[in-house]
Each structure stands twice: as structure tokens, then as C-alpha cells.
Amino acid sequence: MAMVSRFSKIKFSFSGLLFFGLLWTHFFMGSTASEYCYSNIDSACHAKSYTISESSDSLDLEDCDAKYGSIDEIQDDFLAYADDQLQTSFEYLLLSAQFNNYDTNRAGFHKLYRKLSDVAWENALAIIRYINSRGGQLSFENITNDGKNKKRSLNFDISELHSLARVLDSESRLANEALRLHTLATDHEDGAAAHFLEDELMRKQSEMIRDLAGYTSDLRKLLRQRDAPLGVYLFDDYLRTSL
């Protein structure tokens, strides 16, 4: 009985050593396969003295960055979208100011477009912060607008209904572009970037488009009534108190 017990212990110890040996081998091979940054450091520095080798002209750390996934392939499109959001924010701000002058005096529309301007601004900052956190290059030099800016109207002296229609078109365009970016990130197998778009932009955009479409429909119905000016006034007051 003692011999059997002793044999079992030896067998267990051997199995345990074999298991940990295989585990260490897997860890070592897996880690060395991706230690690009460590290789940069090791090739330029003495491991124990922490001094740069005399044979190395400079400490090249090209792989020691925050990049992962397909950020290099998608960052230009994301930055172009951030630029689009910034321009849209300024347009909404000007539209908000137009409805806040002494002649128009629509406090509700002013409040609505100022809110949308702030949202577009925050969207742009969120995209820039995300690209920065992924180790991307924050350069707007490679951005191409594909003629989008030429289609933007700089006339902000428009009616309440026309302003809602223009903003609805802008938000629909931004939402479609976000869907394109989501497809781009998915095609490049960058699930983190796709999730960022869903979590930070796309949910808010769907709600915003729904609200703007509702506002446009309601105001159009009010304008068909006999007391259209009163209806517009009441609608503006509703925006002022509800937002």
C-alpha cells in the first residue's frame, strides 16, 4: 500500500511538472511572437545596465506605441468625420444665432440648434480622443471632403420649417456616414472601433433623427391651419420649455 501511494505521488508530480512545462512553453512562445517593442529596446540597450549601446545611433521605438487593430487603415476616415462634425457644429451655431436675433426672436429654435451644435462638437471631440487613445496620428492634412463642403448652404436666413428640413438632412447624412465608418471598421476586423461608433454616436443619432422628423411633421401640420403664425409661436414655445 505504501509503494502504491508513493508511486501515485511520483506520477502526480510528473504530471504537474509536465503541465506547467507546457504552459510555460506556450506563454513564452506566444509572448515572444508579439514583443516588437521589447525587441526595439533590447537591440538598442544593454539589458542590465539600462544604457544605450554604442553601436546604436538612436533609440528607435517605432513599435512602442498604443496602436492595435486596424487604426492605421481607418484613422483618416474617422478624422474626416470629426472634421465634418466640427463644420456641422458651426453651422448649427450660426443657425441658432439667426433665430435669436431681435427680428426672428424664436427662443425655442435657438435653444434646439444650440443644443445640436453642442452635440456635434462633443461628437468631434469624442472621435479625436478615441483616435488619440488608439495611438493614431491626429493630422487633418490627408482629409478629403469629396465635394461635401460645396453642397453646404451658407444662407441661414430661412424659415422655421426650412431650418428643420435642413438640419434633418444634415443629421441623416452624418448618420449614413457613421454607418459607412462602421462597415469600414467591421471589414478591417476592428471590433473596438465599431463598438465605439455604436456606443458614442449611432444611438444618439437615431433618437435625434426621430425627434427632428417629428418636429418637421408637426410644424408642417400647424402651418396648414388657419392661424399658422400662432401655431408657429406655440411650437417655438414648446421647444423652449421642453428642451
Image (cartoon, rainbow, N blue to C red):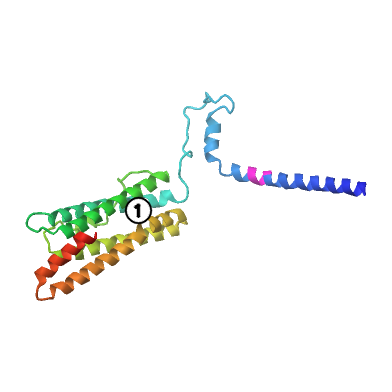
Residue 230 visible, this orientation: yes
Residue 162 visible, this orientation: no
Q: Residues within 10 Å of mark 1 (few under 14, many from 20)?
A: some
Seen as rendered, the residue at the extreme front is: 241
Quarter occupied by the C terminus: bottom left
Count of marks, rendered view: 1
**14 to the left or right of 82:** right
- Mark 1 residue element: helix
For this rendering, which residue is in front, 96 or 78?
A: 96
Q: Which residue is mark 1?
A: 77
Main SS, magenta residues: helix
For this rendering, which residue is in front, 12 or 2?
A: 2
State the image coordinates of residue 86 (x, y, percent, origin top left): 26, 51
Vertical position of residue 169 compared to residue 44: above or below: below
- Looking at the picture, which amino acid does disc 1 mark? Asp
Vertical position of residue 53 compared to residue 205: above or below: above
State the image coordinates of residue 59 (x, y, percent, origin top left): 48, 30
What residue is rendered at 32% in x and 61% in y? 205
**35 to the left or right of 176:** right
Vertical position of residue 94 compared to residue 42: above or below: below
For this rendering, which residue is in front, 125 or 34?
A: 125
State the image coordinates of residue 232 (x, y, percent, origin top left): 13, 67
Vertical position of residue 51 compared to residue 199: above or below: above
What residue is rendered at 9% in x and 69% in y? 229
What residue is rendered at 28% in x and 54% in y? 119
Over which residues does the magenta segment extend?
Answer: 24-28
State the image coordinates of residue 74 (x, y, percent, origin top left): 39, 52
What residue is rendered at 31% in x and 54% in y? 81
Q: Is residue 93 magenta?
A: no
Residue 240 in which image quadrant = bottom left
